[in-house]
Amino acid sequence: MARKRRKPAVDFAVYLAVRLLVCLIQALPPAVAFKIAEVLAWAAYKIDKRHRQVAAENIRFAFPDLAADPARVDRLVRATYRHFLLVAVEMVLLPRKLHVISWRRYSTLYPMARMIAPLFSPRPTLMVTAHFGNWEMAGYMLGLVGMKTYAIARVLDNAHLERFVKRFRQGTGQTLIAKKDDFGRLTDVLGAGGKVATLADQDAGPRGVFVDFFGRPASTHKAVALMAIEYDAPLAVFGAPRVAEPMFYAMVCEDVIDPREYADRADAVKAITERYTAALERMIRRHPEQYFWLHRRWKHQPARRQKPAAELKRAA
C-alpha cells in the first residue's frame, strides 16, 4: 500500500500549533495546566464518539461484572480520557520539573527493585510495557538516573513533530530505534548486551500468537519472545502507574522472565508471551483507568476451526 503523500504546509502548521500549545502549558502554573487538561478530557470524551464506544466495549469484555452497569462503565471511560490528557500535559512539564535533584518529588523507584539485576547484567534485557500509566515517563526516568537504554518507537509521519518529540524522548540519554526501519540496529544493540524497551500490547493481526488478555484471546506479536530466546535476554515487565496527584508515579517491575526457563519447551514463544501478558494484565487491573482502552486490542480473533466433512456427516 502506497504511503499517503504529505502536505508540507499542513505538517508545518500542525507543528507550529503544537509548539505554541507546549509554550502555553509551560508558561502556566501546573495547577492551571492540569485544570485545562481536565476540560480537554471532557471535550474529547464528548466529541470522540468512535473511540468512546470502543473503550466501553473493551471494558465490558474485560470486566464482566461491570457490563450490567452502564454508569460504572461510563465512569471508567471518562477516567481513561482524563488520565491520558493529564499525561499529555505532564509530558510537556517533565523537562522543566524532573531533574536529578527533583525526581523524588514526582516518582518512586522502589517498586522496580526486581529490575535492578537484569539492568546491570551483561546479558541484554528486554523491558516490556504497555500503553499504561505514563510509559514515556518511565523511559525518561531511567535515563535521568543514569541508565543507558533504548526504546523501540514508531516514527511520526510529520517530520517536524518527529524531530521535536525525538529531542524530548532522547533528552536524558535514552536512544530511539525506529520500529520498522531499524532492525539491524536493534539486533546490534541486543547482541552487545543493550537494554531495550518496547510496548507489547498491540494487536498483531491474524498471524499473531493468541494469548488470554482479560479472559479473551488477544493477537500478540511473537517478536518479543523470539528476541528473548535468540539473544538470551531476560524480560523485565514494568509499568509507571500514577499513584498520587498531582503527577506522582511509581516505577513498577511486575515480573522478570528468564528465557532459559523455557529452553526445553516446544511452546516457549507462546508460554513467554502468555506470562508477560498476564503480568501486564495484573498491573492494569490495579489501575484500570490508566490503560488505553481506546485502541482495538482484541481486533483480531482466532479463526474458527472448520469441522471435517466426515465429522459433519456423523453429527447429521
Image (cartoon, helix red, strand yellow):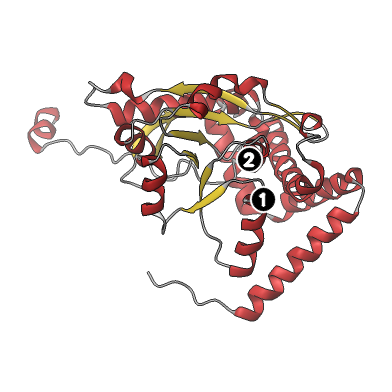
Side (left or right) of 75 relative to 160:
right
User: Which corner quadrant holds the N terminus?
Assistant: bottom left
Q: Please, what is the three-letter code of the amino acid marked with disc 2?
A: Gly
Give percent across and percent down for residue 181: 41, 59
Q: Please, what is the three-letter code of the amino acid marked with disc 1?
A: Gly
How many residues crowd mark 2 within 10 Å: few (<14), some (14–19), many (20+)? many
Q: Residue at x 55, y 19 (%)?
A: 114
Decide if residue 204 is in sight here: no
Query: Looking at the image, which is closer to me, 65 or 263?
Result: 263
Side (left or right) of 102 relative to 168:
right
Query: Looking at the image, which is closer to me, 193 or 314?
Result: 193
Q: Residue at x 48, y 73 (%)?
A: 4
Residues at discs 1 and 2 in contact (Cβ within 8 Å): yes
Rendering quarter of residue 58: top right
Give percent across and percent down for residue 145: 67, 34
Identify the residue under disc 2. Answer: 143
Query: Looking at the image, which is closer to me, 138 or 117?
Result: 117
Label 1 SS: loop
How many residues crowd mark 1 within 10 Å: few (<14), some (14–19), many (20+)? some
Give percent across and percent down for residue 229: 31, 32
Side (left or right) of 271 relative to 284:
left
The CA distance from mark 1 to mark 2 is 8 Å
Rendering quarter of residue 269: top left
Identify the residue under disc 1. Answer: 171
Q: Residue at x 45, y 39 (%)?
A: 194
Give percent across and percent down for residue 100: 75, 36
Q: Is residue 208 above or below residue 268?
A: below
